[in-house]
Amino acid sequence: MTEKQWSTLLDVIHGKEIKPLPVGFIIDSPWLPNWYGIKILDYFTNDDLWYKANLHAMNSFPDVLFLPGFWSEFGMCSEPSAFGARCTFPSNEFPHAHRSIYSIDDIQRISKPNAETDGFAPFIINRLLLNQQRIEDVGHKIYFSISRGPLNIASYLMGTTEFLTGMIINPDEIHHLINLITEYLVEWHDFQQDAFPTIDGIIVLDDILGFIGETEFEQFGLPYLKRIYDRNLSVKCLHNDADCHSSIKYLPEIGINLFNMGFDTSLNELKAQTDNKITMLGNIPPRDVLANGSEQDIELKVKEMLQSLDRKSGVIASCGGGMPPDVSTNNINIFANMVAKYS
């Protein structure tokens, strides 16, 4: 992200109405490698291809805010790997982190990983260090620390069904696990900030928030997210493209000021439930419209989204969730053009 793009992002978050509305997307390994024409495994294992794929996206769409920008990651294996999860990397499919907790008693045997040395963390940081000068030479900076959220990581370590069931029948052990993961994540974000002083934002991705009710969120989500977001940063972003009704009204209390949601709830409703305190990054259907839709489909959904807005401040036009696989260059350009036309 360039300084100009970062300034635009801050303007939107601070309530300034920008015409036309800015366009932004969360982009990472599910979309970038194949869009660039390389295999996913090549993207993960070759620093030069990783850099060139990200740079090509920035140069192809210079007016689009790509978050976080030059994201160093290993898919869903990034954080579970630090807790000992076995990770599988097919040549051109998404990587997968396997369960490492098979009984509730296993939780007590887990220790907090070292945020600097365990799992893929050192590879993530070193990739950025090796490419930092190249990134800055083309006018971009590393503005975000990034991680999956504590519930998301716990669901990979235990299995989603087992984790959600454990909340009900073994709440003490689940709290112990989430607390341990949270302590690690606080240190992991601290490490990222220490490594790159340009960081002034945080992105946490946790779809499991959408699988629990409000009572469970208050117990197992709210206090831990508060600890992770308790840092002096200008941008505090949450991605949850599952159902957000149990958690949405708590986002301002957590300190979040930028939210990337799914596409089943209108932006007006989300803004009302957060007292218009949070910038919304969304939310046309990502797969069925942005990836697979025709020009007419994209125009219709963008027109509906923008013309229905009660207020256009505090909105960055995007899809509901991160950039999905198979979105073409043409469809991104159509989306941006339609946003300019109707805003």
Image (cartoon, helix red, strand yellow):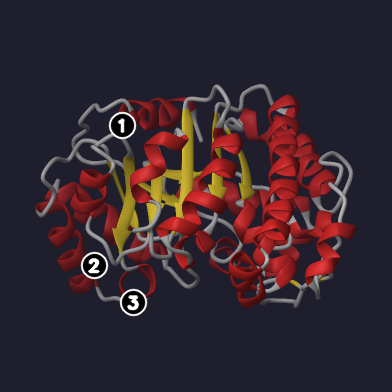
Q: Which amino acid lies under the numbered mark 2 shown in the image of this protein?
A: Ile
Q: Residue 233: x and y, percent?
A: 53, 25
3D distance between C-alphas at marks 2 and 1: 23 Å
Query: Which disc is residue 288 wearing?
Result: 3
Q: How would you rate the neighbour count of disc 3 (Cα within 10 Å): few for under 14, some for 14-19, many for 20 or more?
A: few
The residue indicated by pointer 1 is 12
Q: Is residue 293 left or right of residue 137?
A: left
Q: Residue 278: x and y, percent?
A: 32, 38
Q: Residue at x 41, y 63 (%)?
A: 329
The residue indicated by pointer 2 is 298
* Whether residue 130 can be seen here: yes
Q: Is residue 341 left or right of residue 180?
A: left
Q: How would you rate the neighbour count of disc 2 (Cα within 10 Å): few for under 14, some for 14-19, many for 20 or more?
A: many
Is 57 in front, or is 203?
203
Say if 255 sits above or below 61 in the image. Answer: above
Q: Which amino acid lies under the numbered mark 3 shown in the image of this protein?
A: Asp
Q: How would you rate the neighbour count of disc 1 (Cα within 10 Å): few for under 14, some for 14-19, many for 20 or more?
A: many
